[in-house]
Image (cartoon, rainbow, N blue to C red):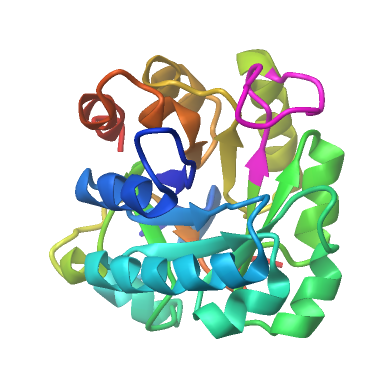
Amino acid sequence: MQINVNNKPINTEATNLSTLASELSLPEKGVAVAINNRMVPRSQWEQTPLSEGTSVIIIKAACGG
Amino acid sequence: MIQFISHHTERYTYLDGIRLALDGGIRWVQLRMKDASDEDFLRTGREVRKLCDRYNATFIIDDRVELVREIGADGVHLGKKDMPIAEARRMLGNNVIIGGTANTFEDIEAHYRASANYIGCGPFRFTTTKQGLSPLLGIEGYRSIMQNVREAGFDIPVVAIGGITADDISSLMLTGIAGIALSGAILRADNPIEELKKIMKYE
């Protein structure tokens, strides 16, 4: 499935935000994530489904580049 | 995605303002105390760290690269007159979020290449919170800057800043920005809590 992370299309097997976080090796702390412009606290990542074309914004260190 | 930039008024101290923002659902805070001493900044910063931990919020400090570790902040925001991003990256390593202020696509490109993790791009319109700013962007400015960012393939979140109010958010988000940074709009409102509710509808 294809989703957008920081406006860049990526392919992922993840069906929820928590699995995406492990796929992208997001650090334990200091990460801000928004799905379709809404910020999602870490405690809700597991219950937050991803679908084709979902827009994810991730603010974290060592992002991009 | 909304970043609250600390601000103080006659009614609210920095900490009051941040507490109010977190209570209202904000999960991204920047501590900005331009005229404060490092000592005051450190003291307040440590309190803000505790608050942000309690609310699971991301915590960025303005400008003071040398205090990031001491405060335990998640990152630092660097304005145009602050330390260059590449230098801050060398000092802080890869585990710290670095944000940079931009007024043009060229600024964004330079920050992106210097390893910034997000951009605060503005000003949207005239603001009394921050004076002596670069030319105003307006909606059209963001539209063209974001088009350039997409065409260049830069996967860096761009947050709009500068004189933004609740009523601007929906049209600004359509330009492709990742979020909004707010300061004065909340605490200067007649009823900050109601204003915050209005803003969080867009979150």
In this rendered view, identify the residue nearer to me: A12 or B93: B93
Q: Which residues are magenta?
A: B120-137
What is the count of numbered marks?
Answer: 0
Q: Is residue A15 visible?
A: no
- Overall secondary structure of the magenta stretch? loop
Residue B117 lies in the magenta stretch: no
Q: Judge whether B188 appears above or below A56 on screen.
A: above
Quadrant where the N terminus of chain A sits is bottom left
**Rendered location of residue B91, percent (x, y):** 77, 83
Q: Residue at x 44, y 34 (%)?
A: B9
Residue B115 appears left or right of A53: right
Q: Residue at x 38, y 70 (%)?
A: B47
Residue extending farthest to the front is B10
Residue B149 picture quarter: top right
**Rendered location of residue B189, percent (x, y):** 35, 21
Q: Residue at x 57, y 84 (%)?
A: B70
Q: Judge whether B130 appears above or below B81 on screen.
A: above
Residue B20 picture quarter: top left
Q: Residue at x 57, y 62 (%)?
A: B61
**Rendered location of residue B153, percent (x, y):** 70, 49
Q: Judge whether A18 appears above or below B22 on screen.
A: below
In this rendered view, identify the residue nearer to me: B62 or B14: B14
Q: Is residue B125 visible?
A: yes
**Rendered location of residue B80, percent (x, y):** 82, 47
